[in-house]
Image (spheres, rainbow, N blue to C red):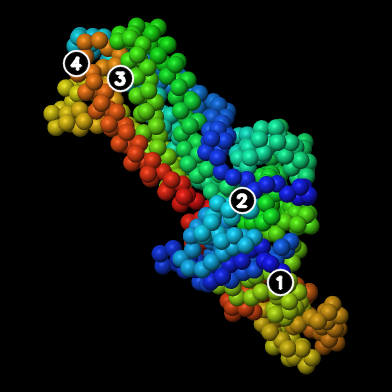
């Protein structure tokens, strides 16, 4: 990796008895999107809070663009943009007023701040709503404005904490496009997400984090490989399980999956083969289909517990939980 | 996207950041009808109610109640301003704005006190309206322009001292509703168990020391000394009030950045 834009080494942070971070290491290369994937309470937001100077870790070091976050937070802040879980913009002001405010705070001057606001409103497709109060915006528009507000100073590094939580699928796609365009413009991005699909879609590399530790790292295909790739999933009635298992076990390794059985599906032909086999044996099942690995599967494979069990909603510390 | 011209790294400036953020706070205030109501109409209604309820009794006790009441109404307006700052602060903490501001290369002091700055502007306007209304009802600055100015400064000092305290509350709790509730819980006893609306001797003996000594009473005594002729020991009365306000200001000024630095 060339000179990393973001580094974290051995980050530890406890809140009382809760060990939010137990030694997190990260490196993000310039112009890369790193997806920090994990359930609620895994330590994603705490990691972001440390990297954005909001929180001092108990141990460990972090740098942004070579600047030590702990010893020179002011210089680090000049290099980052942060879009937190909740849109940090003023509802009662217009979109333009919000952006002009941040322009002024970032020393664009009055005229410069207006110009920069115009640029951003057009880049984030908010021109039509520029002079409406943010309270009238849709969820997707608010998110885009929030993102625009983080990009006012064209920071080389952008942090996105669960950028699409609560958005409808279409707004989510729009936001993904915006994030990709930022990356293509040279911005280094660290984003957190609970959704493998989102990390899959956006991230060049994924770091999986759980209980404050990094438990896996790699590209989306690599991670899915570790889960075992796609499976052919069968919903089977209780009294049929034995017969179906016996039939399938002749050719595949059968595992119990929620509400039925699963066999690894190297390709979509596996599905056809399973159906044909069952048809030959005159066995009918309630439902059958291909299933791509989900975050749950990744967690099952990596930790032996499903993400639902390993997450503790009370754990995401002071920083940001609603 | 728009990253072609690398901007110079932005730097903090207490002046520019303060102006921008105070402007923001004031703009938010002006867009809320309830802010205007609580700044101007509420204190006026209170003034009329108190005049109606206590006016005659107090006249019989030998008070010119318009003259006695105005400082109390002024203090009420300054505390409304202070409470407003705690609401703005808690909204910033709740909505994530504190996090954004803390992650930006801007003046920390400016970011911390900006809500109070916005409320100070509102308080100045509110004082102007209340004093004008007071004049219409018969209140007079009987000690001249100089002490009238000191009167205004002490009143605004009251907003600053209590406003900083309320900022600590707002940033520390970071949720609007509990902040509003606790703000009132602190405010009403201080407001009513005081010499603001009736003299200390109207209270039972065991309460009188508290009524005499508590800061709002001290400030109202000072404002009366500054506006009404015939009061004794003007200098001492004002000094005690100023000492209270400076003490509270220093105390809360030390706490506010900490609360902001830990805000959600």
Instruction: Name the residue furthest left.
Output: B205
Residue A210, how many percent across, how many down? 57, 71
Is there any visible trace of residue A194 in the rendered image? no
Mark closer to the chain start, 4 or 3: 3
Residue where numbered disc 1 is placed:
A1
Q: Nearer the viewer, residue A45 or A59?
A: A59
Residue where numbered disc 2 is placed:
A78
Spatial CA span between label 4 and label 1: 79 Å
Spatial CA span between label 2 and label 1: 24 Å
User: Residue at (56%, 38%) from the top-left corner?
Assistant: B17
Residue where numbered disc 4 is placed:
B232
Left or right? Give the position of B2 relative to B118.
right
Residue where numbered disc 3 is placed:
B223
Q: Chain of mark 3?
A: B
Same chain for labels 3 and 2? Say yes or no.
Answer: no
Spatial CA span between label 4 and label 3: 13 Å
Q: Chain of mark 2?
A: A
Is there any visible trace of residue A80 in the rendered image? yes
């Amino acid at each position: 990796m060339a000179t990393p834009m973001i580094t974290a080494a051995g980050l530890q942070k406890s809140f009382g008895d809760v060990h939010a971070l137990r030694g997190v290491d990260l490196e993000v290369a310039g112009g890369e999107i790193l997806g920090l994937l994990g359930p609620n309470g895994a330590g994603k937001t705490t990691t972001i809070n440390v990297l954005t100077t909001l929180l001092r870790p108990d141990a460990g070091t972090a740098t942004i663009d070579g600047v030590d976050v702990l010893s020179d937070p002011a210089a680090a802040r000049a290099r980052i943009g942060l879009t937190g879980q909740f849109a940090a913009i003023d509802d009662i002001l217009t979109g333009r007023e919000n952006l002009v405010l941040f322009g002024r705070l970032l020393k664009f001057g009055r005229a410069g701040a207006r110009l920069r606001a115009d640029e951003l409103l057009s880049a984030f497709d908010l021109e039509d709503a520029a002079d409406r109060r943010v309270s009238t915006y849709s969820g997707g528009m608010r998110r885009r404005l929030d993102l625009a507000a983080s990009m006012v100073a064209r920071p080389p590094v952008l942090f996105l904490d669960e950028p699409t939580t609560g958005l409808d699928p279409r707004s989510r796609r729009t936001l993904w496009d915006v994030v990709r365009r930022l990356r293509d413009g040279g911005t280094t991005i660290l984003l957190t997400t609970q959704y493998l699909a989102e990390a899959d879609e956006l991230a060049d590399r994924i770091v999986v984090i759980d209980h404050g530790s990094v438990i896996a790292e790699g590209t989306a295909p690599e991670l899915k490989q570790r889960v075992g790739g796609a499976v052919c999933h069968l919903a089977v009635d209780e009294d049929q399980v034995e017969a179906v298992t016996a039939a399938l076990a002749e050719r595949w390794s059968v595992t119990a999956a929620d509400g039925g059985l699963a066999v690894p599906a190297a390709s979509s032909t596996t599905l056809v083969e399973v159906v044909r086999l069952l048809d030959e044996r005159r066995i009918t099942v309630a439902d059958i289909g291909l299933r791509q690995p989900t975050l749950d599967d990744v967690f099952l494979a990596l930790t032996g517990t499903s993400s639902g069990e390993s997450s503790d909603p009370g754990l995401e510390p002071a920083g940001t939980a609603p | 996207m728009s990253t072609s011209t690398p901007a110079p790294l932005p730097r903090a400036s207490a002046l520019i950041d303060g102006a921008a953020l105070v402007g923001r706070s004031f703009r938010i205030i002006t867009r809320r009808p309830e802010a205007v109501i609580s700044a101007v109409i509420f204190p006026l209604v209170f003034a009329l109610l108190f005049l109606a309820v206590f006016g005659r009794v107090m006249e019989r006790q030998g008070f010119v109640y318009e003259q006695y009441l105005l400082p109390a109404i002024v203090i009420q307006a300054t505390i409304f301003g202070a409470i407003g700052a705690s609401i703005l602060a808690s909204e910033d903490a709740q909505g994530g704005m504190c996090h954004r501001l803390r992650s930006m290369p801007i003046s920390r002091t400016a970011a911390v006190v900006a809500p109070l700055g916005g409320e100070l502007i509102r308080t100045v306007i509110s004082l102007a309206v209340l004093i004008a209304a007071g004049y219409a009802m018969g209140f007079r600055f009987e000690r001249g322009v100089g002490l009238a100015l000191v009167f205004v400064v002490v009143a605004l000092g009251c907003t600053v001292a209590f406003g900083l305290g309320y900022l600590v509350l707002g940033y520390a709790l970071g949720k609007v509703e509990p902040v509003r509730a606790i703000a009132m819980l602190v405010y009403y006893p201080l407001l009513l168990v005081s010499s603001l609306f009736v003299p200390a001797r109207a209270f039972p003996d065991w309460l009188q020391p508290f009524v005499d000594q508590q800061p709002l009473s001290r400030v109202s005594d000072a404002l009366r000394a500054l506006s009404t002729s015939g009061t004794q020991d003007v200098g001492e009365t004002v000094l005690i009030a100023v000492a209270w306000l400076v003490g509270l200001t220093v105390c809360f000024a030390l706490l506010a950045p900490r609360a902001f630095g830990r805000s959600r």
